Amino acid sequence: HHDAYFLVADWNALAVSGHAPHEIEQYSWAMVIDCLACGVNPKVATLFIQSWVPELTDVHMILASVTPKAWLERLPSYREMVAGLGEQQGASLAMLGAPLMQAADILALRGQVVPAGPEQRAHIEFTREVARRFNHLYGNVFPEPQAHLTRAPRLPGTDGRKMSKSYRNEIRLSDDPERIKKKIMPMVTDPARARRNDPGNPEVCPVFDLHKVFTGEKGREWVVEGCTTAGIGCADCKNHLLERMLPRMEPVSARRREFQQDPGRVKMVLQEGSTQARSIARQTMDEVRQAMKIKY
């Protein structure tokens, strides 16, 4: 068992998203409410906002002093972001440093296990390298975190790419059943299934990735059998998913409405969580200062 920390990375969003600050505030509150609605229990987990814990920025500054710029430039996520900017707009310093900010969040809280999707594996390895370099220079302060992949490590969006608001391919926890159905039914599937009687491969189908989250083992076996033999069509597969997905989503939507109507309760959770996170990060920063002999 591990202590669980759920961080809303508003500084990182400011660094990489291009959203206006007031939009980031809206997204941050929505994410907190989503976490609570999905069952994150603040009595046993720490839920907090990144910018409310300034010690994370202190650790980021220290790590920036030992991290070569080339390490950041080689990360696939940075190259993708730069490619998306176009010729007229260069990458900001914050965009370059965003993965190091993420590393500082993990290391400041002494993270040992980090739930991560496949696209984040490079970031966790980068975090391990940064910890290793600091420890080599100044002494063993930071544990090297391990990435943890769940049964469904990647949730695809409706177009098959990773689910992201910036791609406008997301299924939101606030979506009502009819809206979810309108997003699921046109989803892309295995391109090999151009016709109803073409067999397919569920492992390359984004819809099956959602089955891994919402459908039990027997249901998944039914989907695999039907897809690989062309015994079922893609519409059958999607309806099977909706039959299992919508009942799971409804209680989450109901809890979400409850938290939306009680913003004081949400703010109290965040204040308590941020105080707890600050306490841990402050201890880490004290150890960093001692290791570096910065005691003034």
Image (spheres, helix red, strand yellow):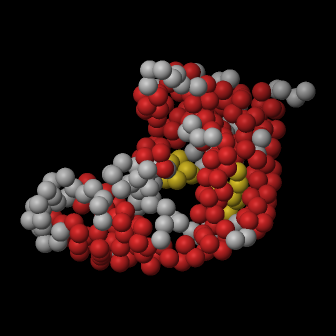
- Residue nearest the observer in this picture, 193 or 229: 193
Residue sitting at the far left: 197
Residue 296 visible in this rendered orientation of the protein = yes
Residue 219, above or below 180? below
Q: Residue furthest right?
A: 296
As displayed, is residue 209 above or below residue 139?
below
The foreground one among 60 and 112 is: 60
For the point 53% across and 34% down, the residue is: 126
Q: Name the residue at 33% across, 71% down.
A: 241
Q: Residue at x 35, y 73 (%)?
A: 242
Q: Residue 108, how many percent across, how many down?
A: 70, 42
Residue 90 vertical position relative to residue 135 in the rendered view, above or below: above
Q: Residue at x 58, y 21 (%)?
A: 68
The quadrant in which the N terminus is found is bottom right
Figure quadrant of residue 209: bottom left
From where the camera sits, is residue 136 visible?
A: no
Residue 178 place in picture, x, y as percent: 41, 72
Residue 17 location, x and y as percent?
Answer: 55, 39
Q: Relative to 274, is 107 above or below?
A: above
- Number of disc labels: 0
Q: Quadrant of the C terminus?
A: top right
Left or right: where 245 falls relative to 46: left
Task: Tell me where residue 19 appears, x and y as whole percent.
Answer: 59, 41
The image quarter containing residue 56 is: top right
